[in-house]
Image (spheres, coloured by chain):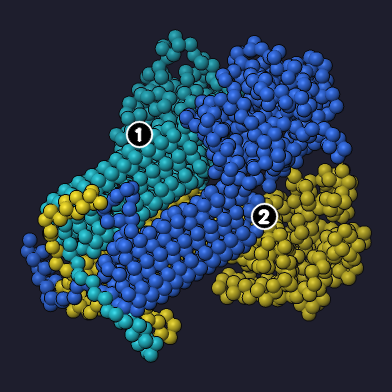
Chain colours: A blue, B cyan, C yellow
Amino acid sequence: MSKTKPSSRAKRPSSEAKRSSPAASFLILAAGLGKRMKSPLPKVLHEICGEPMLVALLRSLAGARADAEIGVIVGHGREKVEAAVRAAVAANPALGKLRIAFLVQSEQKGTGHAVREAMATEWGRERVESGAPVVVLPGDTPLVPSALVEAVSAPLEKKAALRLLTCTLAEPKGYGRIVRAGGKGTGAVLRIVEEKDASPKERAIREVGVSVYAFDSAFLAASLPKLTTKNAQGEYYLTDLVGMAAKAKKKIATLGWANAEDLRGVNDLWELSQVERTLQLRIVEAHARAGVRFLDPYSVAIEAGVAIGEGVKIHRGVVLRGSTAIGHGVDIGSNTVLRSVKVGDLVEFKAGCYAENSIVEDGAKVGPYAHLRPESHVGRQAKIGNFVELKKATIGEQTSIAHLSYVGDAKIGARVNIGCGFITCNFDGRVKNGVRKHVTVIGDDCFIGSDVQMVAPVEIGKGAYVASGSTITKNVEADALAIARARQENKAGYASRLRQMSEKE
Amino acid sequence: MSKTKPSSRAKRPSSEAKRSSPAASFLILAAGLGKRMKSPLPKVLHEICGEPMLVALLRSLAGARADAEIGVIVGHGREKVEAAVRAAVAANPALGKLRIAFLVQSEQKGTGHAVREAMATEWGRERVESGAPVVVLPGDTPLVPSALVEAVSAPLEKKAALRLLTCTLAEPKGYGRIVRAGGKGTGAVLRIVEEKDASPKERAIREVGVSVYAFDSAFLAASLPKLTTKNAQGEYYLTDLVGMAAKAKKKIATLGWANAEDLRGVNDLWELSQVERTLQLRIVEAHARAGVRFLDPYSVAIEAGVAIGEGVKIHRGVVLRGSTAIGHGVDIGSNTVLRSVKVGDLVEFKAGCYAENSIVEDGAKVGPYAHLRPESHVGRQAKIGNFVELKKATIGEQTSIAHLSYVGDAKIGARVNIGCGFITCNFDGRVKNGVRKHVTVIGDDCFIGSDVQMVAPVEIGKGAYVASGSTITKNVEADALAIARARQENKAGYASRLRQMSEKE
Amino acid sequence: MSKTKPSSRAKRPSSEAKRSSPAASFLILAAGLGKRMKSPLPKVLHEICGEPMLVALLRSLAGARADAEIGVIVGHGREKVEAAVRAAVAANPALGKLRIAFLVQSEQKGTGHAVREAMATEWGRERVESGAPVVVLPGDTPLVPSALVEAVSAPLEKKAALRLLTCTLAEPKGYGRIVRAGGKGTGAVLRIVEEKDASPKERAIREVGVSVYAFDSAFLAASLPKLTTKNAQGEYYLTDLVGMAAKAKKKIATLGWANAEDLRGVNDLWELSQVERTLQLRIVEAHARAGVRFLDPYSVAIEAGVAIGEGVKIHRGVVLRGSTAIGHGVDIGSNTVLRSVKVGDLVEFKAGCYAENSIVEDGAKVGPYAHLRPESHVGRQAKIGNFVELKKATIGEQTSIAHLSYVGDAKIGARVNIGCGFITCNFDGRVKNGVRKHVTVIGDDCFIGSDVQMVAPVEIGKGAYVASGSTITKNVEADALAIARARQENKAGYASRLRQMSEKE
C-alpha cells in the first residue's frame, strides 16, 4: 500500500495526557450539491468502489476511533444523505459504534458558514463545553486514511488555536499556499493565500493547505462569528480562521502529510473515477499481499466490502461487488461478475459468469457464461455449464446442468444429470395477485434427457428417467421412465426431391 | 483534458489585421506507405478511435477553421486515401465545409520533394498568389488539437519567412535540435540540427522541431527549387528551408508548444496504439466531465463519433463504436459492445451484450449476453434476456423474450410473452435468387410457451396461445390455442430396469 | 522495448581471448519458499505470463548462451522445482541445449550458504577446475534480459575477484549501497552496506547492488568457507564476499545496468503481478512492432509461448495462452480467450469466444460467445455462431452451426446447415468402464432443421434432411427426409377462454 504515515507526525501525547484530554470530535462538510457532478445525487453520495464517498470517509474515521463523535453537516438532499448514512451504519458492523449527528446548513454560504451553523447547535455547544478539539474534514475526500485521521485528531499542541494539515506539492497550482514567517518554510504560519491573490513569490511556495483542520473548540466558537463575506465569492471561508489566529498571535500548529493523493477531492465525474482508481488499486494491492493472485490487477473491480480467501486466482476483468465472500483456492475466470455471492472453497468459475445474490458450495464448477440470478444455490461439486441460467433454483450435490438450459423456481436433487436444452416452464401466462410462477421438483439420481421441458407445477420422483425431446406436464413417479415424443419417420429420397423442386423454382 | 494551449502563443493580430490578411492554407503530408506499419494499408488510413489518422487530423483542422483550404499530398495508395477522405467528409457534417484538394507526389523523395510538387500545382500557384501562409503538417500526428492549428496558422509575424513549431523535451533524443544565436534558447533560430549530425553541446539542447511549419508562401515557392539531396538519406528535406532562411538573414518565428504529446507521430503499430490510448483517454475524460460515469475509464473504448447523454453509467470494458448514440440515464454493463446502435433513455444493458446497427427504445432491458444483430428494433420497456439472439427483428412494447431464443426475420407485437428456447425457423434450406429467409409474425398480447419453433412463413393472430414444445408450421388465428406435441407416457419401474441393465453390461 | 543495453558495458575481450577463456557457468538461487507469497508453491514456480519465473529466467539464459552450464540450487519443494524445469525443457526446444544440474541446499541459511553448498558439490569442483567465472543470479528476477546475462557473464577483468552488477536509482531506499573509495562514485568498490547499517551519508548513495555477481571461481571457492553468520539475521550472506575481496585488496569490477526494472525481484503476489505486467507489455510491444494491431495493449494477456501472424487485429481484453498460434489477417474480438488453439489465416472470432486445445481452419467465423471445448476442429470457412458449444467435434468446410447448439462427440461433414437449438445427446446416463459417450455422424450437404436432437449413436447419410422439432433416434439414409414430431392442432377461441378463467380466479 501507499505510504500513509505522516512525514512529520505531531508529537504523541503521553498516555497520561491521553487519558486526561478528551477525544477530538469531527465535523464533515457534506452539504454541497456538487454542480459539476452533473447529477441530481448529493455529491457525497456518489459511490466509490461500491459505497458513497461519505461512507468511505466514515469507515476511515471508524478505523481511527471506533466510537468517534461525528457531526455531518447536511444541506442539499439532506434526507438522502441521512438515509444513506443510516443504511451504511446498519449494514456495516465496523461503523456501528460511531456517534453520528446530522447538522443542517440551511443555506449554502461557504465552508465557514457551514461550520458556524454546526457549532451554533446543541451538538456544537457540547463540543465547546467538552474542551476537545474539533477536526473539520471535507466530505468529498474519500481517500483519507485512518492514519491521517488519527494524526490530525491528536490532542492539540499547548496553546495552539488550531492544527493545519499541509502537503508539499511539486505542482502547487490551484491550491492555497502556506505563507510562513521568515520565508524558509519552517517559520510560524502567517496565513493561507489563495492562488489568485498570491504574489509571484508566494506562488512559488510549494506547501499548500488541504482543507483539513483541528481546531481548539473555544477558539473556533469565538472566531466563527467574526468571519465576513468580504471576498470575491461573497462566501464565508473557514480558511480565514488561519489568518485570524495569526493576527491574534495565536499558535498555529501544522502537520505535514507526505502522500498528497490521500487528500484528493472530487469535483466532477472524471475526478471521481481517478480517485476511485486509486482506492481500487489500494484494495487490490491489500488482497494481493494477503495471498490473492491477480492476473491483471489493473483490470479488476473489487468493492470495499468483498472478502477473498488465500490461494484464490482472479483472472483479468473480474468484478466482485457487494457482500461477495470467496473461500480458499477458488479460480475466477476472466470477466466473471459476482454481486453479493457466497462462494465456498475450491470453486471454479470459468470466463464470463454473471451471478447475483446466490450461493455456490465447495468444489462446484460454473461456466463459462453461466448466469445465476438471485436466490440460486449450487450444491457441492455440482456443475453448471455454458449458457445456463438459474433463478430461484436449488441444485443438489454433484448434479450436472452442463449446457444451454433455464432452471427457474426449481429444486433439483443430488446426482441428477440434466441434458442440454432443459427448460422449466414456470410461467403459464396467467398472473394473479402479482407474479405467479410454478415450481419444478426433481428428486435425487434422476436422469433428464436433452430438450426436455417441464411444465410446472410438476414433480419428478427419485431415480426417474425422462427421455430426450419430451414435454413433461404430469408428475413422474420414482424410478419410472417418462416419454412424450412422436415417432421418427424416414421418407426415402424425399430430400433429393425437395432439392430438385428448389432448383426448378 | 490535457493542456492544449500554447505556452508562448504567437501575438494575436488585431481583428483589423485578421480581416485584411488572407487565411492560411494547409498542406498535409499523406503520401507515405509507412513501411514499419507492416501493413498494405497507407499509413494515414490506419484507424485511431474508429477513424483514419488523417480524418482525425482533418477534424482538428475543421475545429479551427470550418472552411479551411487543404491540400492533401497523396502517393502510396492514393485512391484509397482519397476514397477514405471523401467517405469521411460525406458522413461527418463537421467536415463538410473543408475545401480539400488532393495533390499527387509521383515518387517518394522526401518531405521537401512532396511540398515542392504540391506547390508546383495549380493549387500551389493559387496559394502563392493569395499571399496567405502555407501551414505544413505531417499526416501521422492525429493528436494535434484545434488550438494548435489555430495558433500555428495565425498571420505570420512581419517579414518572417516562416514560423516553426517547437517543443522543449526532458528527453530530446531522436529529435532535431533548434540551434539559436547566443546559445541561450532565446536568440534567433540559426538552424535545426539532426541528432546524428549534432555536436555533444548541441545534443544537450532540449528545444526540438516537431515537423509543423507555417511558411510565407512566396518564400516557400522561391526556396523549394533550391533544396538538394546532398545528405545521408539522399532525400529532399523540408527542414532544410529553416537553414536557408537563416542564411538569407530572414526572420524565423517560433511557436513553443507546451504539450509535446499533441505532436506524437506514428511509425509502427505500437506507436499507433500509444497515440490511440492518449486520444481515447481525452475522449473519455470529456464525456466524464460532461456527466457520464465511467466505472473504469482506462478499460473502455469509446470512438470519436459516439454521443452519450447525462447520467449514463458505463461499466468496465464497454466498447461503443461507430455512430452509437446513448440517451439519458442508461446503464451499460461490463464488456457490452455496441456498434452504431441508437439507444433511448433509461435503457439497461447487462454485462456482455453485443449489438450492431440496431435500435433500443426507452426503458428496455437487455442482457446479460444478448446478441442484437443488424436491423433489430427493441420496443419501449421490452425485455431481451440472456443468450437471446435477434436478427432483423422488431420487438413490440413491453414484450419479453427472456431466455435462450433466436428471433430472426420476425415482427413481434406488443405485450407478448415468449418462453425459453423459442426459435424462428427462417431458413428452409432452399435458396433461390440469393438468400431466402421467411418471416414470422406474432400479434399483440400473444403467449408463446417454451421450446416453440415457428417454421416461417407463419403468422400468429392477436391474443393467441402456443403450447410449450410445439413446432408451429401453420398460421394460428387470433385468440386460438395451438398445440403440437405428443402425449406423455410414464412407464413405471422402467428406469430401475435400465439401471440394472447398465450394471450388468 | 525498454532499453536492455548496459550503460557501461564491460570491455569486450578480443575474440582471441574469448576462445581461450572458458565460458562462465551460472548458479541460480531457487531454494527459497517465499513465505510472503502465502502459497505452498515454491517461490520460483509461481507463473509469470504463463510460465514459472524460473523458466522465464532459463529462457533468458538460453537466449544469451544456448548451451549454458547451469546449477539450479533447490531446497523447498525441490521435487516440484526439478519436475517443472524438466517439463519446460522438454516442451521448449529453445531450452533443449542447456546443461542443467540441480544442487540441493539442505537447510535455508542464507544466500552465502546456498552458494557454499553448491560449490562443494562435484558440479562446483568442476567449475573451479575449469577456471571459468561463476555467475550467481536470484531465481526470482524473471525480467533479466539475455543482454544482461551476456554482459555479466563476459570474461572477468584481469585479476578481478568478481564483477558486481549495480544500478543507480532515484530512490535507493531498501537496497544495499555501493561504497566506493573517494566517495565520488567512480573509485574502487570498498563494500556494500545494507540500508539499516548505513550512515546518513551512505544512505544518500544512489548506486546499489542488485544481487547479481560474476565470481572468479577460485576466489569464490576460497572465500565461501570464511563466511560467518555474525549479523542481525544470523545467516550467511553472499554479499559479504564483496567486503572480503576489498579487504584482501582484490580488484572488484562493476557493471552498471541502466534499466533497474530488469532486476526487479518478487517477494509477494503483488510484486509478482507488477513484474508480470512489465513482462506482459514487453511481449505485447514486440508483437505490435512486428505488425500486430492491438486496440488496447494494456488490456490483453498474451503468454510467452504464443505466436501471432502479421495483419492480426486484437481487440480489447483478449487472452491468448499456452501454445496458441494465430495465422495472418485474423480478427480476434474483445474478451475472446484462446488456450492452445491453432488458428489459420483470415479467421474471425467475434467477442467473448472461449476455446481450448482446438483447431480453427482458414476463413472460419466463430462467435460471438462460442465455446470450443478440447478437440474441436472447425473446417475452412465454417461458421460457428452465438451460444454454440463444441466438444470433440469435427466440423466440415463451409458448414454452419449458427445458433444455440451443443455438438459433442460428433463428426459433421461439409456444407451442412444446422439450425438453431441442435443437440447431440451423447450421454445416455449409463456409464460403464469409465465415461461412455456416443458418437453422432452427419454426412456432407445435409440440412438439419431447428430444435433437432440426435440420440447417439446415430448416423445421418449424405444429403439428408431432418425436419425441425425432431428427436432422431434411428439412422437416416442418404437423401431421405426424417421427421419426428406431432401434428399441429389449433383450438379456436381457447386462448380467450383461458384468459377469462384467469381473470375469474
- Count residues near mark 2 (Cα–Cα under 10 Å), then give few for <14, some for 14-19, many for 20+: some
Residue at horizontal 78%, vertical 80%? C122
In the image, farthest residue toward the front:
C505
Residue A284, given in percent of the width and then of the height, sits at 61, 50
Residue C20, given in percent of the width and then of the height, sits at 75, 71
Work out how far the residue at label 2 is from the one at label 1, CA to CA, in angstroms.
60 Å
Above or below — where is B163 with respect to C97? above
- Count residues near mark 1 (Cα–Cα under 10 Å), then give few for <14, some for 14-19, many for 20+: many
- The type of residue carrying mark 1 is Leu
Above or below — where is A435 with respect to A219? below
Q: Residue A169's quadrant in the figure?
A: top right
The answer to whether residue C446 shows anywhere in this view is no
Provide the chain ID for the residue under circle 1. B
Nearer the camera: disc 2 or disc 1: 2
**Residue in front for this viewpoint, B353 or A67:** A67
Q: Quick one: SS at disc 1?
A: strand
Dot 1 corresponds to which residue?
A: B103
Q: Residue C12's quadrant in the figure?
A: bottom right
- Mark 2–mark 1 CB contact (< 8 Å): no
Residue A439, given in percent of the width and then of the height, sits at 35, 61
Residue A86, given in percent of the width and then of the height, sits at 57, 38
In the picture, measured across the screen, residue B141 lies left or right of residue C495, that is: right
Dot 2 corresponds to which residue?
A: A289
Residue at horizontal 63%, vertical 75%? C83
In the picture, measured across the screen, residue C44 lies left or right of residue C196, that is: left
Query: Is the same chain shared between marks 2 and 1?
Result: no
Query: Number of callouts in the render?
Result: 2
- The type of residue carrying mark 2 is Arg
Above or below — where is C11 with respect to A235? below
